[in-house]
Amino acid sequence: MKGNFFVQLFALLAIFIVALVLEISPWPAGFHSFKPAWLVLALTYWVLALPTRINIGTAFIFGVVWDVLLGTVLGVHALVLSCFAYLIARYHQILRNLSLWQQSLLIVLLVFFVRLGVFLLELFIHSAEFDWKEIFGALISGLLWPWVFLLLRKIRRQLGLH
């Protein structure tokens, strides 16, 4: 399957669409704060793996799509995800050399800061309340990172994406 551009593009789009569907899927009211940041996890992996192909522009596009799907102010998630992708792409060589558990700890912090960034932008635009239980979603994302990483790495290797 190496070199088949359209198959690779379709697979990447399918992965991001699945992440978006998981992101907008409803959870019970009491467990909403425990929802992992699926799009952030997928974006993190692909920016780490292919920083020249999946980067700030990709993050911006999927941030706008995320804003449209959630019905939030257009550009909030796009700006936060673009800044997030910049940091990951800028330090991808350092982050790649961390062990999976160190990356998981970093994912917890990054997901929390993404959610905090979205809150701060929404607070600046209109009134918003921050739910400190959002840290649980960041913790769940960190716990899921090793499995997401290994699954996406296997997909990347089978597709021959380098």
Image: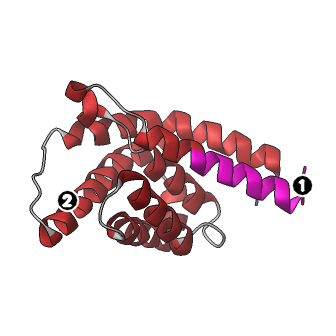
Location of residue 1 in the rendering, given as x and y in whole percent from the top left corner: 90, 49
Query: Above or below — where is 27 with respect to 67?
Result: above
**Residue occupying the point 58% across, 50% down:** 16
Location of residue 113 in the rendering, given as x and y in whole percent from the top left corner: 26, 58
Q: Secondary structure at mark 1?
A: loop
Badge 1 crowding class, 10 Å Cα cut-off, few under 14, some 14 to 19, many 20 or more, is few
Q: Secondary structure at mark 2?
A: helix
**Residue occupying the point 63% across, 46% down:** 15
Q: Nearer the viewer, mark 2 or mark 1?
A: 2
Can residue 96 be seen at all in this image of the molecule?
A: yes
Query: Above or below — where is 137 with respect to 16?
Result: above
For residue 122, side relative to residue 84 (left or right): left
What secondary structure predominates along the stretch shown in magenta? helix
Can residue 97 be seen at all in this image of the molecule?
A: no
Q: Nearer the viewer, residue 125 or 81?
A: 125
Residue 161, by quadrant, is: bottom right
Mark with earlier residue (2, 1):
1
For residue 43, side relative to residue 159 (left or right): left
Q: Is residue 7 magenta?
A: yes
Quarter of the picture containing the C terminus is bottom right
Q: What number is the disc on residue 119?
A: 2
**Residue occupying the point 30% across, 42% down:** 138
Bounds of the magenta segment: 1-17
User: Which three-letter amino acid code belongs to the residue tagged 2?
Assistant: Phe
**Residue occupying the point 72% across, 42% down:** 155
User: Which three-letter amino acid code belongs to the residue tagged 1?
Assistant: Lys
Query: Above or below — where is 140 with respect to 79?
Result: above
Residue carrying label 1: 2
Query: Above or below — where is 35 with respect to 63?
Result: above
For residue 117, side relative to residue 88 (left or right): left
Location of residue 133 in the rendering, given as x and y in whole percent from the top left corner: 16, 38
Q: Is residue 75 magenta?
A: no
